[in-house]
Image (cartoon, grey):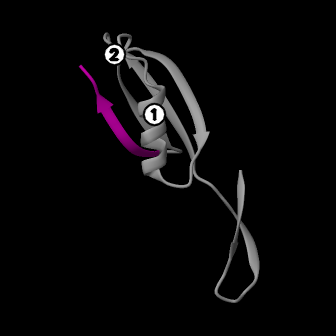
Amino acid sequence: MLKIKEAATGFAHQCRMPHYRIRFFDHSGRVFGTEEMDCAQDQLAIDKARELHTHGIGAGYEIWEGERHVHTEKLR
């Protein structure tokens, strides 16, 4: 997804929203699902991962933006 930003010069330019990958883990530590999304900022990706998490199956998840680790949450 692209957003248009206007620079201080008044010229509009395109910038890409960060692309996030969420890996969901089961209680054995194995990945049982993944989800990819574009979000404007890290906290929005974290909030979305919390919504998508499957209680009872999942033991946690990791969020990545490319090679950058954003967040890990281990649930009991």
* Label tally: 2
Judge from the rendering whether residue 6 lies leftward or rightward of residue 58; answer left or right: right
Asked whether 4 falls inside the magenta stretch, the response is: no
Q: Position of residue 37 (x, y in %)?
A: 60, 39
Task: Indicate the secondary structure of the residue bearing disc 2.
Answer: loop
The kind of residue tagged 2 is Gly
Question: Residue 10, relative to residue 4: is it above or below?
Answer: below
Question: Residue 13, relative to residue 30: is it above or below?
Answer: below
Asked whether 75 falls inside the magenta stretch, the response is: yes
Q: Position of residue 15 (x, y in %)?
A: 68, 64
The kind of residue tagged 1 is Ala
Q: Residues within 10 Å of mark 1 (few under 14, many from 20)?
A: many
Separation of marks 2 and 1 at Cα, in angstroms: 17 Å
Checking the image for residue 29, the label placed there is 2
Q: Residue at x 36, y 41 (%)?
A: 71
Q: Report the front residue among 30 and 73.
A: 73
Q: Report the front residue among 67 and 65.
A: 65
Q: Main secondary structure of the magenta part?
A: strand
Judge from the rendering whether residue 68 lies leftward or rightward of residue 39; answer left or right: left
Q: Residue at x 53, y 36 (%)?
A: 21
Q: Residue at x 49, y 32 (%)?
A: 22
Q: Residue at x 48, y 47 (%)?
A: 44
**Quadrant that contains the C terminus:** top left
Question: Which tag is nearer the camera, tag 2 or tag 1?
Answer: 1
Q: Position of residue 7 (x, y in %)?
A: 66, 81
List the residue tagged with mark 1.
49
Question: Residue 41, relative to residue 38: is it above or below?
Answer: below
Magenta residues, start to end:
68-76
Q: Position of residue 75 (x, y in %)?
A: 27, 24
In the current view of this chain or complex, which residue is farthest to the left?
76
Checking the image for residue 22, the label placed there is none
